[in-house]
Amino acid sequence: MIDAYEDPGTPDRRGGWRYLGWLVLRQPWRSAAGALLGSVWMVLLAATPLLMAKAVDEGLAKDDMGALALWTGLLVVVGSFNAWLSILRHRTMTRVRMDANFRTVKVVVGHAVRLGAALPRQVSAGEVVTIGVGDVQQIASALTVIGPGVGAIVAYLAVSALLLTVSVRLTVIVLLGMPLIALLVGPLMRRLQGTEAEYRERQGVLTARIGDLASGLRVLNGLGGKGLVADAFRRDSTRLREQGYRVGAVTSWMQALGLGLPTLYLAVVTWLAARMAVQGTITVGELVSVYGYVAVLVRPVSYFVDWGYQLGRGVVAARRVVSLLRLEPEPDEGTREAPAEPSVLYDPESGVRVTPGRLTALVGATPTDTAAVVDRLGRYGPTEALWGEVRLTDIPLPQVRARILVADHEADLFAGNLREVVAPFRGAGNCATSRNELAPADGHGEALSKALHTAAADDIVQALQHGLNTPLDAQARNLSGGQRQRIRLVRALLADPEILLAVEPTSALDAHTESLVATRLHHTRKGRTTVVTTTSPLLLTHADTVHYLVDGKVTATGTHQQLLEDTPGYRALVARDSEEVVG
């Protein structure tokens, strides 16, 4: 089975069938073993009626107790051996399915990481969730055909060969059954793929809406729009339910055929064999064997129908995975080297100029204006920004990411203990200029302690029952908003980037905590380039340079005190008590 750190390989993105084939070829020996074990197991099931026929004809019919004991003993041995093979087959196929499951997860997650900031612009979160939760399981289940599926084909041919020794007429009837199954199941399989694909698509849309509704519930309540959104969600969920009924209708027909066709087989062939036995065309022992052969055929025929069912759903799921894998990250055509020394960051669109080694603050009446500047300076969208004399887009993206870190105040926090959330790696971060190294596994290193202190997050660790080993929910929902914000700041500080661009790093903090963070951040990042977006006087007081933006353009630059005195718009925006501040 694939190792957690093993390279999953390069998936075949040419289509759903191709992707399923790639999963099989990535584990050739295990797949071959599953097919071999499944085939031998199925064939030995067909051998049981043959041994029973020998016991009847050569033992009971001839009153030969020795022959009866011989064939009965062989029947016990073959049955026991086949039971052992069944265990091996099941274990092997479980490993095949798990490998396909984990390999697909690694491929999808890896591609999502490569897409980076382009992912939410190209596919909804609900679609990604639906792929990760449902489609991955369907793909793994489809690989069941490797073992029982191949075994069913081999067993079908083996039983037909055995029937040929009894009656050509019965053999022809059995062989004609497969085209009949294809005629009945084929249209249903195509219909299943269509209805299943539509169902999955609607499921992804509804999942995305659930996420949007949950995250914006408080705002919706405040605006009085909760009822409208609830009605829209109710309509979408009703349509999804109706589509689910359509999928269920097709599925029920396929499952009914899986049970009905083998039963029909058994009835027709047994009736014909019984008439032949009465007419003396075949012996009683051969009649018993024919009945046993047809009974054995029930399982392969059922597998054929289930095979079509699982493959139909698996191909739909694989196509959805392939559609995600076909998404391309934003083109990176950078060929020039980043500045070797700390250099000015300049955004021509807004006029923001970030001097290296200083704490720069961006102030705007609209938070989206300052956040847009940060996105351009961090190259998280179209940008004409310059780093020194070089355009950011001319520098290879890995170099930009290694030295410039954008710390969003709503960045995702994954589930795990606190230490894993803030310091998932032993190194101090992913930056080439990182100067500190995290402590050993106990997490009490100098870098971590310093980051916790700077973000005023010491009290969070002390208040948690197990300290740094305390489990956090996804998005750290078991912490308050202010605590989550400080945890995000700790994570950014541990990365120790050459340039830190922080969006509203203290917006959820009380005045006392915000004052501590502002003072400590200025001291800790002294000599390092730091940019913050904020309207808080407590943070602006410590800024070396403040840019005041109106409609996304710099209209004034200076220190916080200078802008308070000279820029009325700035003073009205940031001064909580303008007379007290100016006076």
Image: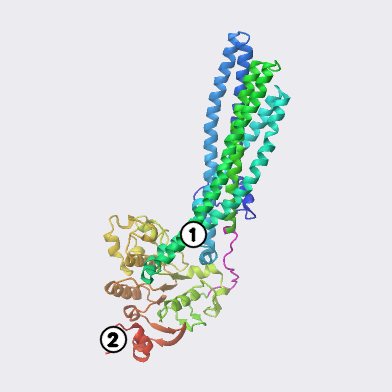
Foreground residue among 26 and 52: 52
**Front-most of residues 197 and 490:** 197
Image quarter hosting the C terminus: bottom left
Q: Position of residue 314 (x, y in %)?
A: 58, 48
Disc 1 crowd rating (10 Å Cα; few below 14, some 14-19, many 20+) is some
The image quadrant of residue 395 is bottom right
Residue span colored magenta: 324-338
Q: Residue at (36%, 83%) from the top-left corner?
A: 573
Residue located at (27% from left, 55% from top): 465
User: Residue 413: which quarter of the image?
Assistant: bottom left
- What amino acid is at disc 2? Val
Image coords of residue 422 (percent x, y) = 38, 61
Task: Kindly identify the amino acid type of the residue bearing the numbered disc 1.
Answer: Asp
Residue 207: give its label.
Answer: none
**Color scheme of the displayed model:** rainbow
Q: Circle 1 — which element?
A: helix
Q: Which residue is mark 1?
A: 236
Whether residue 147 is visible to the viewer of this picture, yes or no, is no
User: Residue furthest toward the bottom?
Assistant: 566
Give the labeled residue for mark 2.
581
Query: Residue furthest toward the right?
Result: 168
Give 446 or 180, whichever is nearer the viewer: 180
